[in-house]
Amino acid sequence: MLLKYLSFIFFCVIGLVAAADRGSYIVPGLGKRKQAILRSGGGIWDIAIAMLENDHLSTDYPYGDNKSGDSANFGIFKQNWFMLRTSTSQFKGQPASNANNGAVLNKNLKADIKARQESQNFYGTDKWFAGHRNGQSGLSNPYTQDITNYKNGVNWIHDQLAKDKKYLTDDTRFWIYVVPI
């Protein structure tokens, strides 16, 4: 009997811990931003990726995300310069030293979305997630646990958004904990 009781408690605690790593809350004005993303050529995947990166789907974070060179991040998706310069029409062929050119994505939502979609089309989904998460080293080793956790996080947010069309226009932000890098 004691074993059954302890097993029950164990599974309840595990369930609470698992549930504590994801959820949703309201961010005033987020629905307008979601609509701007959709009007600019984005889709549910774009919203999900941006939602994992930023509470407000914005570029309101330190320049380059406090990174430089190929690691510098730009736009609502925090796309790294390496991926931008190796896979997008706007930046392809530029050297790592031109990372500041990526800053245009912080001000131009359509260009940001286009670059993200071009990059994913260039690399394919699995490689894109790997390179987006870990740059060149991610492309070389795309199936690490960290990359898988990131991809699963985006997938979970996508699935929540896709459950009901209202989530594409309301102020609900879905979140899931993924170790920041």
Image (cartoon, rainbow, N blue to C red):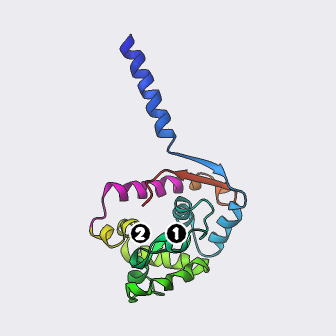
The residue that appears at 53% across and 54% down in the rendered structure is: 157
Relative depth, front residue between 71 and 149? 71
The residue that appears at 49% across and 52% down in the rendered structure is: 156
Query: Which label was assigned to residue 77?
Result: 1
Q: Position of residue 169 (x, y in %)?
A: 69, 60
Q: Looking at the image, is mark 2 or mark 1 earlier in the sequence?
A: 1
In the rendered image, the residue lying farthest to the left is: 140
The quarter holding residue 93 reads bottom left
Tell me whether the residue at label 2 lies in contact with that at label 1, contact meaning CB atoms closer than 8 angstroms: yes
Label 2 residue SS: helix
Is 172 positioned to the left or the right of 139 in the image? right
Relative depth, front residue between 132 and 126? 132
Query: Which image quadrant: the N terminus?
Result: top left
The quarter holding residue 161 reads bottom right
Question: Which residues are drawn in magenta?
Answer: 141-158
- Tell me the kind of residue under disc 2: His
Residue 55 shown in magenta: no
Instruction: Give the spatial CA distance, label 2 vs label 1.
Output: 9 Å
Q: Position of residue 117 (x, y in %)?
A: 48, 75
Query: Which image quadrant: the C terminus?
Result: bottom left
